[in-house]
Amino acid sequence: MPTYLYELLDKAGKPTGETFEIVQPMKDVALTKEPKTGKPCRRAIVAPAIAGKWSGDKKDTLSNKNLERLGFTKYERKGKGYMERVAGKAGPKSISTED
């Protein structure tokens, strides 16, 4: 189960700077109140913790083959404004911002 970061909110709905973490299933709805105090909160948007070559993990977890196995789609830049799908089956084979 993932660990989510929540930020507490003031009465106007703005972040107070206080945060807390909670482990909950992905299928659960995001909390709206801090469980201990009942203060209003919202789930914070944070970068996911993905293992890579820098993590000490011996497997190449970000390889195209592994990403595809896990259901991800990866694009690589092949030219100015042009990207090709190199892993995964979802999405278009290429993306172009040039007309």
Image (cartoon, rainbow, N blue to C red):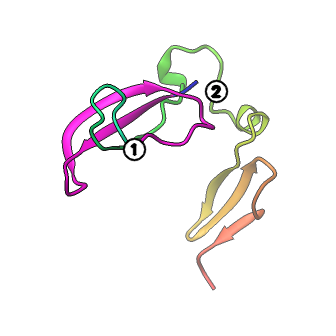
Q: In this view, does 66 lie to the left or right of 20?
A: right
| Residue plotted at (54% across, 25% down) | 51
Which residue carries the number 2 mark? 61
Residue furthest bottom as drawn: 99
Mark 1 and mark 2: span between their CA atoms? Answer: 34 Å
Helix or strand or loop: what does disc 2 sit on? loop
| Residue plotted at (19% across, 52% down) | 11
Could you tell me residue 67's position as x and y percent?
A: 70, 37
Q: Is residue 47 left or right of residue 84?
A: left
How many C-alpha atoms fall within 10 Å of the one at disc 1: few (<14), some, or many (≥20)? some
Whether 5 is drawn above or below 1: the answer is below
- Give the residue type that dot 2 points to: Thr
Q: In the depicted view, which residue is nearer to us: 4 or 52?
A: 4
The stretch drawn in magenta includes residue 53: no
Q: Is residue 55 left or right of residue 72?
A: left
Could you tell me residue 44's position as x and y percent?
A: 37, 43
Which residue carries the number 1 mark? 32
Helix or strand or loop: what does disc 1 sit on? loop
Whether 89 is drawn above or below 46: the answer is below
Whether 16 is drawn above or below 12: the answer is above
Dividing the image into 4 quarters, which one contains the C terminus?
bottom right
Tally the marks.
Answer: 2
Q: In the depicted view, which residue is nearer to us: 81 or 57?
A: 57
- Please tell me which of labels 1 and 2 falls first in the chain: 1
| Residue plotted at (67% across, 33% down) | 63
- The residue range painted magenta reads 3-32
